[in-house]
């Protein structure tokens, strides 16, 4: 079963460092959606895909990248409002 979530990720380092990391992980897990850099330290992510892939994606975000962990992660259920055309995009 697929699910859609909205994730707000707050990081202490500049968000561009994590863009590639998030993009690659979403593609590997075949998650559709988009990430939007709201501020240099805040990324909003809409992720849509199989429940187990979404869980793994969230776990990866909590774990961080190269020893850099987020200072806050908020995950809420989200109604899929668009067609992501089978891809994940980062919008800056």
Image: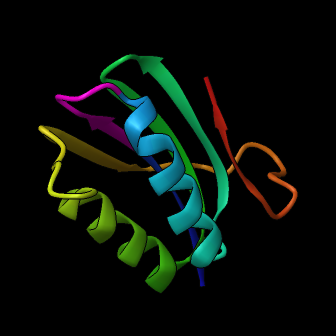
Residue at left offset 37%, top offset 75%: 55
Q: Where is residue 48, by image quadrant?
A: bottom right
Check if residue 10 falls in the magenta segment: yes
How many numbered marks, from 0 up? 0
- From what the image shows, is residue 18 above or below residue 61? above
**What is the x, y in percent for residue 17?**
39, 38
Q: Nearer the viewer, residue 87 or 54?
A: 87
**What is the x, y in percent for residue 29?**
57, 77
Q: Nearer the viewer, residue 57 or 14?
A: 14
Residue at left offset 87%, top offset 57%: 85
- From what the image shows, is residue 41 above or below residue 49? above
Residue at left offset 66%, top offset 75%: 30
Query: Residue pushed farthest top?
Result: 39
State the extent of the magenta-drawn residues as a range.
Answer: 7-14
Q: Where is residue 56, by image quadrant?
A: bottom left
Check if residue 65 falls in the magenta segment: no
**What is the x, y in percent for residue 28?**
60, 76
Q: Nearer the viewer, residue 5 or 60?
A: 60
- In the picture, measured across the screen, residue 20 lies left or right of residue 34, that is left
- From what the image shows, is residue 92 above or below residue 3? above
Report the coloring of the rendering: rainbow
- In the picture, measured across the screen, residue 86 lies left or right of residue 21, that is right
Pick the quarter of the image with the N terminus: bottom right
Pick the quarter of the image with the C terminus: top right
- From what the image shows, is residue 35 above or below residue 21? above
- In the picture, measured across the screen, residue 54 lies left or right of residue 79, that is left
């Amino acid at each position: 079963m697929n699910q859609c979530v909205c994730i707000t990720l707050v990081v202490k380092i500049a968000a561009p460092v994590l863009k590639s990391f998030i993009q690659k992980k979403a593609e590997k897990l075949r998650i559709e959606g988009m990430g939007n850099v709201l501020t240099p330290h805040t990324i909003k992510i809409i992720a849509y895909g199989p429940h187990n892939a979404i869980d793994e994606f969230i776990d990866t975000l909590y774990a961080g990248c190269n020893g850099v962990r987020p200072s806050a992660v908020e995950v809420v259920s989200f109604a899929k409002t668009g067609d992501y055309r089978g891809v994940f995009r980062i919008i800056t």
